[in-house]
Image (tube, rainbow, N blue to C red):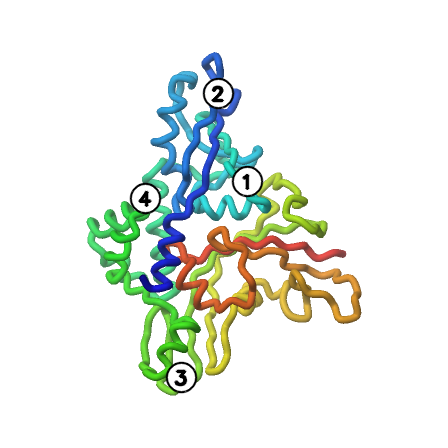
Amino acid sequence: MAANEEAMKYVWEGAIPLQIHLHKSEVASHPAPPPALVLAPRIGYLPLLVPLIKPYFKDSLPPGEDSIWFDYKGVPLKWYIPTGVLFDLLCAESERPWNLTIHFRGYPSNVLIPCEGEDSAKWNFVNSLKEAAYIINGNCKNVMNMSQSDQEDLWTSVMNGDLDAYTRLLPKLKMGNIEDEFSRKESLSSPVSRQGGGTEIDVAGQVKTARIPVRLYVRSVSQNFENLEDVPEIDTWDEISYMNRPVEFLKEKGKCFTLRDAMESLLPEYSGDRAQTSGEEEADGSQETRGEIKLVRIQGIELKLEIPFSWVVNNLMNPEFYLHISVLVIGPQR
């Protein structure tokens, strides 16, 4: 098995143990039901768990219409964000099992967009795939031209965690891969011009460019901390900035475009001479008063910023071809 295939396998098999409690205001039985234990795929979405969870609590629910949603410590969870990203973003210190609360009433429409279960999750996935295709290729015709049955099969493969079925359908999307630093070194003896994943490689091998779809989630805290367990709990989504922004992947001969380079393009206010990066100190020992990146987490992995960005893209992207990056920063001190 090739290295990137093995990494993709780990991503697809990644799961988070959930302990789901029925909100006490909705318990209509005595005694209250024990929490449900569910293993949630990282690349999946919370609405896809409802068919597993609802039957478990059905005998404890009051009569009435269902409007199902989840919260974590009182914060409604945005259903269109992959479950693994929610976990990475909201749990600075990993919590296993992850304790969530399920609600069947009182949908917080002021915080969450409407959700019609699997249909909404599927719409969100396909729409994101079209957006990613447009960023990578300049159009989304390959997605639009897929037959209805192929689109259904692609969604089913994601919903069921069937990597083999998903891989068989990938050639129809024609997204391609970014040539990473490791495979490039292995193939230097055969310099072949190629296009793929929005990459343009000239014959001379000088400048290579691509556009990488990125969804960036930035949580800012006001006070520095030594350990992740000291990070304060999140109270509201207002504490998180969400950016849907492509990275211009620039690679020059003899230079490696790293995750640090990507983060500097995404968050210039936390880069270079204008900010301090976690683990680095000013040469004169003075206290840094500007922003600081404390943590970059992708697919549950706390990554070093020196890793080649091409490896991150090829191995840690979600199935809809977006790279979801959760960042914890210390906000500028004024």
- What crowding class fits label 3: few (fewer than 14 Cα within 10 Å), some (14-19), or many (20 or more)? some
* Residue type beneath disc 3: Gly
Closer to the N terminus: mark 2 or mark 4?
2
Closer to the N terminus: mark 1 or mark 4?
1
- Contact flag, marks 2 and 4 (Cβ < 8 Å): no
Residue at image position (56%, 65%) is 305
The residue wearing badge 3 is 205
Determine the CA span between mark 1 and mark 4: 24 Å
Determine the CA span between mark 3 and mark 2: 63 Å
* Dot in front, 3 or 2: 3
Name the residue nearer the viewer: 252 or 35: 35
Above or below residue 281? Residue 14 is above
* Dot in front, 1 or 3: 1
* Residue type beneath disc 2: Glu
Give how far across and how far down residue 266 sits, in percent: 54, 63
Closer to the N terminus: mark 1 or mark 2?
2
The residue wearing badge 2 is 26
- What crowding class fits label 1: few (fewer than 14 Cα within 10 Å), some (14-19), or many (20 or more)? few
Q: In what element is the residue under mark 3?
A: loop
* Residue type beneath disc 1: Glu
Tag shown at residue 211: none
Say left or right for 84 vs 263. Answer: left
Give how far across and how far down residue 42 sits, in percent: 42, 46
The residue wearing badge 4 is 159
Tag shown at residue 95: 1
